[in-house]
Amino acid sequence: MTRTRGRKRALSDEEKALWQQAISKTDPLRQEVPDFVEIIKPAQRRIQPDRSRITPFKLGEASQKKIPENRLQPSLDETFAKVSPNMDRRNFDRLRKGKKPVDGVLDLHGLTLAEAHPRLISFVRDAHVSEKRLLLIITGKGKTGEDQGFMPVRRGILRHQVPQWLQMPPLAPLVLQVTQAHGKHGGSGAYYIYLRRQR
């Protein structure tokens, strides 16, 4: 059987007869689809939301559930209550009770972050060079009154920022211990900074 390039040649009558004779003696491989088989189409129904779990409400009506109060975790009081001492326990207890003599005081109360940071760095460095050990840093407790804003705002930005500055370079290598001051030295509005000895 020759084939012309580009198109198929039609079968002759003799070839067609031979083909019919060949297929008449064979069984088909695939059976016909039985009459009882039906093609199942997916259901065309719309899924309805379960409204039984939705609590009906009217605009302006107060919710029955109490919304938990926004609170920034953890508070400084909680953080410093769990502080482990980097110094011996006896001296640490005396420090927290305000029984150790203060060698220097820095009052940052009322300053902006941009003003307070360089003053803190300079004060702590000078004190370390002068071989002072215990410093009192006064930050203030922050503005009083409730925060009525949508997002909670920390009260006393310096009060929260100073401990972070003391844990970062260039001050971290100089500082042995940071803890809140005793009530007679300002309580939660001030910090004791206990410096390392010069090497």
Image (tube, grey):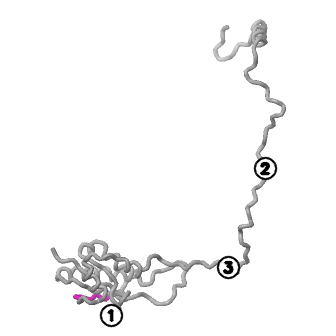
Q: Secondary structure at mark 1?
A: helix
Give how far across and how far down residue 138 sits, in percent. 33, 88
Q: Residues within 10 Å of mark 3 (few under 14, many from 20)?
A: few
Please name the residue that numbered disc 2 is placed on. 44
Highlighted range, magenta? 102-107
Give how far across and how far down residue 199 sits, in percent. 15, 73
Q: Residue at x 33, y 89 (%)?
A: 182
Please name the residue that numbered disc 3 is placed on. 64
Q: Quadrant of the N terminus?
A: top right
| Mark 3 residue type | Gln
Q: Secondary structure at mark 2?
A: loop
Q: Residue at x 67, y 79 (%)?
A: 64
Asked if marks 3 and 2 touch (Cβ < 8 Å), the reply is: no
| Mark 2 residue type | Gln
Q: Nearer the viewer, mark 3 or mark 2?
A: 3
Q: Residue at x 81, y 37 (%)?
A: 38
- Earlier in the chain: of badge 3 and badge 2, it is 2
